[in-house]
Amino acid sequence: MEKGNKLPFDLKGQTLYYTGPSPARPGQVLGSAGPTTSRRMDIYTPRLIAAGIRAMIGKGSRSPQVKEAIKKYRAVYFATIGGAGALLSKSIKQAEVIAYEDLGTEAVLRLTVENFPAIVANDIYGGDLFEQGKAKYQRDK
């Protein structure tokens, strides 16, 4: 993207799930597919949101730059359950490699999901569930 090249898939209106699933066992669509720490992707995320990503799913809080891009471009960040990859994979009904197949489990997949458990952590108005939680339970010193 920095060189002006197009990605091999369209970002507009898409949801990005930060996961590196394990290989599927026989009869499975995908192996364990738990979220990875989203903040590791924050260096790239504002540009991806500007290019059309409208939602992200992962675990953990986001950087101020990502939260600002979420507000500016009216995106949303969903948090899901870390450590529950086997449970989460049951919500994945279909998985198709759409780019970078040579990367194995790190390839870009198009997932079809049903009843995927996630909550809104950052919204288009600047709401931040992580900050709200800290403020609610912070002890006065």
Image (cartoon, helix red, strand yellow):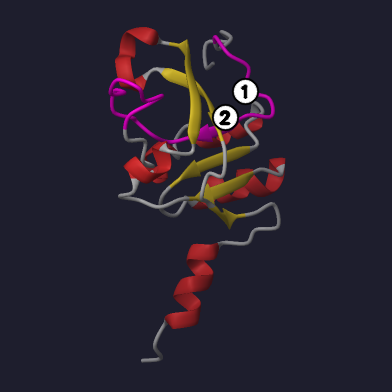
Which region of the structure is painted magenta?
Answer: 8-31
Q: Residue visible at 62% across and 23% down?
A: 11
Quick check: marks 1 and 2 in contact, CB under 8 Å? yes
Which structural element holds mark 1?
Answer: loop
Q: Residue visible at 50% across and 80% down?
A: 136
Q: Is residue 47 visible?
A: no
Which structural element holds mark 2?
Answer: helix
Q: Residue visible at 52% across and 51% down?
A: 118
Query: Who comes first in sequence, dot 1 or dot 2?
Result: 1
Q: Is residue 66 above or below residue 46?
A: below
Residue under label 2, please give it: 48
Q: CA distance from mark 1 to mark 2?
A: 8 Å
Q: Main secondary structure of the magenta part?
A: loop
> As rendered, which of 135 and 72 lies closer to the eye?
135
Q: Judge from the rendering whether residue 44 lies leftward or rightward of residue 21; answer left or right.
A: right
Q: Residue visible at 34% across and 42% down?
A: 85
Residue under label 1, please give it: 11
